[in-house]
């Protein structure tokens, strides 16, 4: 009986169709609307956790620059504000939206504030950080502005440390390939 239970548990916890992708997730925007990641099929995506009061916050400028340069080329940036590191994103969704717009002219999609680590980790970040779910590798969100690169099929293909600028030549090469 125990083996049958283990087999059933395995069948319901391991995807039978192989590696997962991001397309099964829905998230909330800063404006409270539902954003379906399935709408990104066929596009390269950079997912980045952000914060307004961090030494790396000026990366918003490079993120916006990438957005403006490549938004018509099947490339999308998704920002996910998170207050997981030293309380550097204390604002409400409305305050975050105002800050991003007023200080950096951000108009790429920004999602509602989430947690990117710990027991409150958002399911999308559970996917991004666990090889058993993403099929790529295990990772830990080190700090604000860590970047996850997603290919046109919704698969994680890269993890970029927080201090590497969004406009790094290797990121540009990935976008343009």
Image (tube, rainbow, N blue to C red):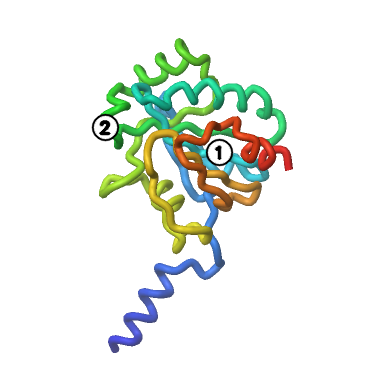
Mark 1 crowdedness (10 Å alpha carbons): few <14, some 14-19, many ≥20:
many
In the image, residue 105 lies at what x, y percent? 52, 14
Residue position marked by numbered label 2 in the rendering: 86
* Horizontal arrangement in the rendering, residue 176 relative to residue 113 (left or right): right
Mark number displayed over residue 107: none
* Horizontal arrangement in the rendering, residue 158 relative to residue 11 (left or right): right
* Horizontal arrangement in the rendering, residue 7 relative to residue 79 (left or right): left
Contact flag, marks 1 and 2 (Cβ < 8 Å): no
Please identify the quarter of the rendering in which residue 33 is found.
top left
Instruction: Residue at the far top: name it.
Output: 102
Q: Residue at x 67, y 38 (%)?
A: 175
Mark 2 crowdedness (10 Å alpha carbons): few <14, some 14-19, many ≥20:
few
In the image, residue 62 lies at what x, y percent? 56, 24
Locate the C terminus and report the quarter of the image it occupies. Answer: top right
Secondary structure type for disc 1: strand
**Would you place residue 86 above or below residue 4 in this image?**
above
In the image, residue 136 lies at what x, y percent? 53, 58
Mark number displayed over residue 46: 1
Mark 1 vs mark 2: which is more N-terminal? 1
**Would you place residue 19 above or below residue 173 in this image?**
below
In the image, residue 28 lies at what x, y percent? 42, 34
Q: Residue at x 38, y 20 (%)?
A: 96
């Amino acid at each position: 009986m125990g083996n049958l239970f283990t087999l059933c548990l395995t069948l319901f916890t391991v995807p039978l169709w192989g590696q997962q992708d991001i397309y099964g997730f829905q998230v909330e925007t800063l404006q409270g609307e539902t954003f379906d990641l399935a709408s990104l099929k066929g596009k390269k995506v950079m997912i980045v956790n952000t914060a307004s009061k961090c030494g790396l916050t000026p990366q918003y400028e490079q993120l916006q620059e990438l957005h403006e340069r490549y938004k018509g080329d099947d490339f999308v940036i998704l920002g996910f504000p998170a207050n997981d590191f030293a309380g550097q994103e204390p604002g409400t969704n409305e305050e975050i939206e105002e800050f991003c717009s007023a200080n950096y002219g951000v108009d790429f999609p920004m999602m509602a504030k989430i947690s990117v680590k710990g027991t409150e980790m958002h399911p999308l970040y559970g996917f991004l950080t666990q090889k058993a779910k993403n099929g790529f590798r295990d990772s830990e969100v080190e700090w604000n502005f860590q970047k996850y690169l997603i290919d046109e099929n919704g698969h994680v293909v890269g993890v970029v440390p927080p201090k590497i600028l969004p406009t790094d030549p290797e990121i540009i090469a990935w976008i343009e390939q």
